[in-house]
């Protein structure tokens, strides 16, 4: 777990100062959102917490929220 945190700190220190210096605020925002998601998923994997399947979320979105039903063969 310590190795995971060290790697994420290095990645953060290599990328974020350049984005701030160039005032790329949108890119920084997208980077931070994806960075946090990746860190949480990596931490969950390291701690042996079951990671939810993205396919289940997509199936729920398509079938229940959007109301698109696929024909059954």
Image (cartoon, helix red, strand yellow):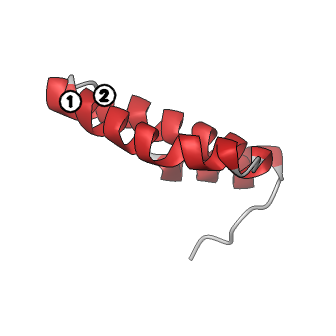
Q: Secondary structure at mark 1?
A: helix
Q: Nearer the viewer, residue 36 or 46?
A: 36
Image point (31%, 28%), residue name: 43
Tell me if residue 1 can be seen: no
Give the residue at the far right of this rendering: 66
Q: Nearer the viewer, residue 71 or 38?
A: 38
Separation of marks 2 and 1 at Cα, in angstroms: 5 Å
- Name the quadrant containing residue 38: top left
For residue 65, side relative to residue 43 (left or right): right
Cβ atoms at labels 2 and 1 below 8 Å apart = yes
Mark 2 crowd level (few <14, some 14–19, many ≥20, 10 Å Cα): some
For residue 60, side relative to residue 51 (left or right): right
Residue 35, position as x, y percentages in the image: 50, 40
Image point (79%, 61%), residue name: 68
Q: Residue under circle 2?
A: 43
What is the quadrant of the N terminus in the image? top left
69 to 43, vertically: above or below: below
For residue 36, side relative to residue 39 (left or right): right
């Amino acid at each position: 777990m310590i190795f995971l945190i060290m790697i994420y700190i290095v990645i953060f220190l290599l990328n974020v100062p350049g984005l701030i210096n160039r005032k790329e605020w949108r890119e920084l925002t997208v980077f931070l959102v994806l960075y946090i998601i990746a860190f949480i998923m990596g931490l969950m994997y390291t701690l042996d917490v079951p990671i939810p399947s993205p396919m289940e979320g997509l199936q729920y979105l398509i079938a229940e929220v959007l109301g698109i039903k696929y024909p059954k063969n």
